[in-house]
Image (cartoon, grey):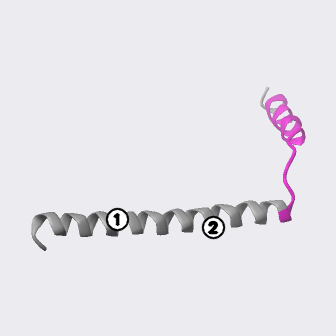
Amino acid sequence: MFIKFFNDIKSELGKISWIDKSENIKSTAGVVVVTIILGVILLLIDLLFSKITELFLGGF
């Protein structure tokens, strides 16, 4: 019973279309770049709202 189960798993894993190394590196680099860009944008928005809040609250 377990042997059939593991043979079925092996068969299904053989059907998967795995990406190659260069495509994997490009995808990872894209994720890193987008994450950094969004981090900088959120930093700028946070700084902007912090300054606005300081202005309204009298510079705490």
Q: Which residues are magenta?
A: 4-22
Q: Which disc is residue 46 wearing?
A: 1
**In front: 58, or 6?**
58
Q: Secondary structure at mark 2?
A: helix
| Left or right: 56 as drawn, with respect to 31 | left
Q: Quadrant of the N terminus?
A: top right
**Could you say where residue 32 lies in the image, as x and y percent from the top left?**
62, 66
Q: Is residue 31 above or below residue 60?
A: above
In the displayed structure, does residue 8 sit left or right of residue 29?
right
Residue 19 magenta-highlighted: yes
Query: Which residue, as the protein is rendered here, is positioned at the far top?
Result: 1
Where residue 4 sits, quadrant-wise, is top right
Q: Amino acid at mark 2?
A: Val
Of 40 and 56, which appears nearest the observer?
A: 56
Residue that label 2 marks: 33
**Residue 1 versus residue 52: which sits nearer the camera?**
52
Residue occupying the point 33% across, 69% down: 47
Using the image as rendered, state which of residue 31 and residue 2 is in the foreground: 31
